[in-house]
Amino acid sequence: MAAQAVRTEKLDLRLSSAAKRRLEAAASVASRSLSAFVLESALSQAEQTLADRHTFVLSKAKWAEFQRALDAPVRSLPRLQRLLTEPGYFDAVPAPTEER
């Protein structure tokens, strides 16, 4: 059994009466407290939302293609190099101003 993390943070939430009743009904059906139900649901949705940032699945052919792309020699991209080395708009030295 995994160790339970110490809960030190609080999250306040404003919602309509109808939304709260719906969450309470769902928590009851799941035999969970309202807090546990909302926390588990929110964490589950967070994992789904962030999943594509952690893991992606490729077929064997696409994985081989991906590895070839990673192993390919670096291509020279002169326009990109120029873009990255030229001063940007906000890097320009401001024009001197007259003192009053």
Image (tube, rainbow, N blue to C red):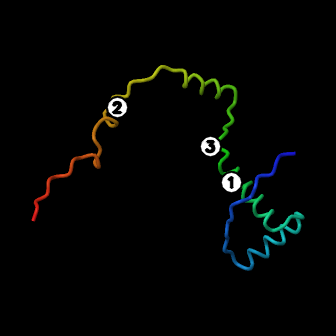
Element at label 1: helix
Q: Quadrant of residue 38?
A: bottom right
Q: Which residue is mark 1?
A: 46
Dot 1 or dot 2, earlier in sequence: 1
User: CB under 8 Å between callouts 3 and 2?
Assistant: no
Q: Nearer the viewer, residue 78 or 91?
A: 91
Q: Residue at x 79, y 76 (%)?
A: 21
Name the residue type under label 2.
Gln
Q: Residue at x 64, y 44 (%)?
A: 52
The quarter of the picture where the N terminus appears is: top right
Q: Position of residue 87 (x, y in %)?
A: 27, 41
Q: Position of residue 54 (x, y in %)?
A: 65, 41
Binning the other alpha carbons within 10 Å of mark 3 as few (below 14), some (14 to 19) or many (20 upward) gives few
Element at label 3: helix
- Mark-to-mark CA distance, 3 and 2: 28 Å
Q: Position of residue 41 (x, y in %)?
A: 76, 59
Report the side of 17 relative to 53 (left or right).
right
Dot 3 or dot 2, earlier in sequence: 3
